[in-house]
Structure formats: C-alpha cells, structure tokens
Image (tube, grey):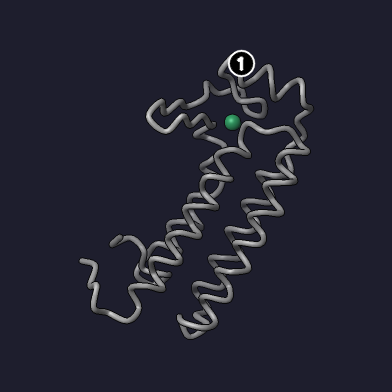
Amino acid sequence: MLDLDNPMTRHRFRAAALDGMILERAKLMTIASTEGRYILLQDCQMRLERMRQLNDEHFKASPFVSAAIHELETAIQTLAGSDVCESSAAQAEAMGICPVCGTELTRIKTYLSIFCSPCLETVSSARRKLESGEGFGTWAI
Ligand SMILES: [Zn+2]
C-alpha cells in the first residue's frame, strides 16, 4: 500500500516518473532506426543520471539500486545498438513487423503506441528490480 504521509513517497513518485519516461523511450527505440535509437539513448542516459542522483540523495546510495540502474543502462545500450537503416525502420513500422527480430509489433491503440514486445523484454529484468521493495519501491504506485 502506498503511504502518502511517508516522506519517501514523493521520491518514489519521482523514480516512477523517470522509469515511465525511460520505458516510453525504450518502446520507441524498438522500432527506430540506428540514428533514432542513438538520439533516444542520449535522452535515456540523462534520465538514468537523474535516477542515480535520486538514489544518492534519497535512497542512501543503495548498492542494489545502483546495480539495477547500471543493468538498465546496459539493457538500453543493447537495445540502442541494433543496426537498422531508415528505410528498414519505416518499412517495418508500415508492415507491423519488428525490424530487428521479425516479431509482429504490439499496437496499443488507446495510447497510439507501437513497439516490439520481445525486444522490449531486454529492459524488463532491470526495471522489475528497480520497482521492487529493495529498489525504489515503486511497485505500490
Ligand atoms: Zn523485436
């Protein structure tokens, strides 16, 4: 249960917001070209840096959180490292097929969201660690 009177709650909300922004960029990355992935990676690294500051300033520089942030950064870099030319990215999105693994893309019409679920799995393990009670504890939000 989320305790709104707990002084840590606002820091957990901040962590959840950063995680959400990184997740949105990771989704976009799964269907982007190499250049697009690089731009998204820069953006993610800025937010990962803010996560590190949050950990240092409000989570007693937790080694568990620090390791999970590092794992998330490595996963994002893996996602960003796929070689996809502009025309392949455009063609893949038009056909609804992942330009990297060839899986049918997931479309969530309500959010106008389109991404590759298997490729997105790359960031799941690290995100689950950050959400856990040992991590930022954002699972309760
Ligand atoms: Zn894929």
On screen, residue 42 versus residue 28, left or right, reads right
- Give the residue type at disc 1: Ala
Q: How many marks?
A: 1
On screen, residue 22 versus residue 3, left or right, reads right
Q: Is residue 18 above or below residue 29?
A: below
- Residue ID for mark 1: 94
Q: Which of these two is toward me, 33 or 130? A: 33
What is the x, y in percent for residue 60? Answer: 48, 85
On screen, residue 27 versus residue 2, left or right, reads right
Q: Which image quarter holds the N terminus?
A: bottom left
Bin the neighbour count of mark 1 within 10 Å (Cα to Cα): few under 14, some 14-19, many 20 and up: few
Residue pictured at 58% horizontal, 69% vertical = 50
What is the x, y in percent for residue 64? Answer: 49, 74
Q: Which of these two is toward me, 13 or 127? A: 13
Q: Is residue 57 above or below residue 34?
A: below
Q: Which image quarter holds the C terminus?
A: bottom left
Residue pictured at 33% horizontal, 73% vertical = 9
On screen, residue 120 versus residue 101, left or right, reads left
What is the x, y in percent for residue 68? Answer: 53, 65
Q: Quadrant of residue 102?
A: top right
Q: Which of these two is toward me, 111 or 55? A: 111
Q: Is residue 37 above or below residue 31?
A: below
Residue pictured at 68% horizontal, 16% vertical = 91
Q: Secondary structure at mark 1?
A: helix
Q: Quadrant of residue 17?
A: bottom left
Q: Quadrant of residue 87?
A: top right
Residue pictured at 39% horizontal, 69% vertical = 12
Q: Which of these two is toward me, 122 or 58? A: 58
What is the x, y in percent for residue 56? Answer: 54, 82
Residue at the farthest top position: 95
